[in-house]
Image (tube, helix red, strand yellow):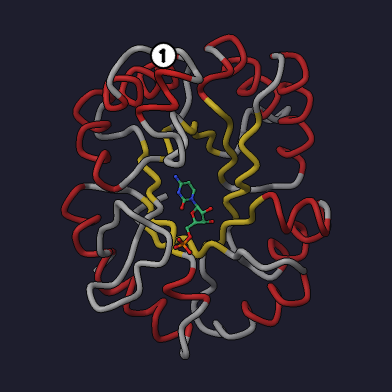
Amino acid sequence: MGKDVIIACDFPTAAQTLTFLDRFPERKPFVKIGMELFYAEGPSVVREIKARGHRIFLDLKLHDIPNTVKKAMAVLSGLDADIVNLHAAGTAEMMRAALEGLTRADGTRPLLIAVTQLTSTDQNALEHELLIDRPMDEVVLAYAENAKNAGLDGVVCSPLEAGKVHRRCGSGFLTVTPGIRFADGEKGDQKRIMTPAQAKIEGADYIVVGRPITAAADPAAAYARCCAEFTD
Ligand code: C5P
């Protein structure tokens, strides 16, 4: 899989999601399905979108004891998602168990990537609630390295961190980056942002783009603009 734009389909129902995806008749975009849609509609929404020819990043961020995560990953593997994820904070043992669960009888599996620290966690919460007494950058890179050593394929990170992650973990270790906005677009609630063109320069492998495409007057044109900036 090469560089690509992933559309974050943050819609509450399958019907709204499918109506939205009908607007892309030519090139079927790679889509991200998160907890809201998955919990509302269940596995059938993944099967339906997959059957329509889209690739899927199933963003469920698993974090539990290794045996539970292994079994849950085996179920997700059967849904034929292309990328799934978990929290690196679950430990290397949990990440290795997840890989085992994901791997099908024929040896194939979806890509598995890790969340290092949520971008909603700031330095203050890191130190005073999670009791991790290190700079955020150092924690993110150390967790990325743990994920790499456990055999994972990459991490979700800010586009501002993509270069650092590649320098620490190698250029083949995937960086999947949300927080993307057009230069002339609304920032919304995202604080640390980059344009698709800047994310390309930073070396991000996949950009996850939600509202700049889903809330655009012409989503297909916004998607084409993202692809032109990031992949061409
Ligand atoms: O609409 P927007 O482009 O901000 O959507 C970005 C998507 O990426 C959302 O689904 C959001 O939950 C997700 N995300 C994020 N920042 C992270 C991790 C995930 O924005 N650190």
Residue at 62% across, 15% down: 94
Quarter occupied by the C terminus: bottom left
Q: Determine the secondary structure under disc 1.
A: loop
When the figure is inspected, residue 125 is found, relative to residue 191, above or below; the finding is: above
Residue 77, image x, y percentages? 71, 38
Task: Judge from the rendering whether residue 142 lies leftward or rightward of residue 14; answer left or right.
Answer: left
Disc 1 C-beta below 8 A from ligand 1: no
Identify the residue at image location x=33%, y=71%: 227
Residue farthest left in this picture: 201
Task: Give x and y (percent) for residue 202.
Answer: 19, 48
Please give left or right for residue 5 compared with residue 194 in the image.
Answer: right
Q: Is residue 128 above or below residue 87?
A: above
Crowdedness near tag 1: few (<14), some (14–19) or many (≥20) residues, C-alpha within 10 Å: some
Left or right side of 160 for 74: right
**Image location (x, y in percent) of residue 165:** 27, 31
Q: Going 42% across and 49% down the picture, which residue do you hit?
A: 1
Give the amino acid at mark 1.
Ile
Task: Report which residue position mark 1 lands on.
Answer: 132
Q: Quadrant of residue 121?
A: top left
Estimate the x, y position of residue 7 in percent, counting from the top left: 50, 65
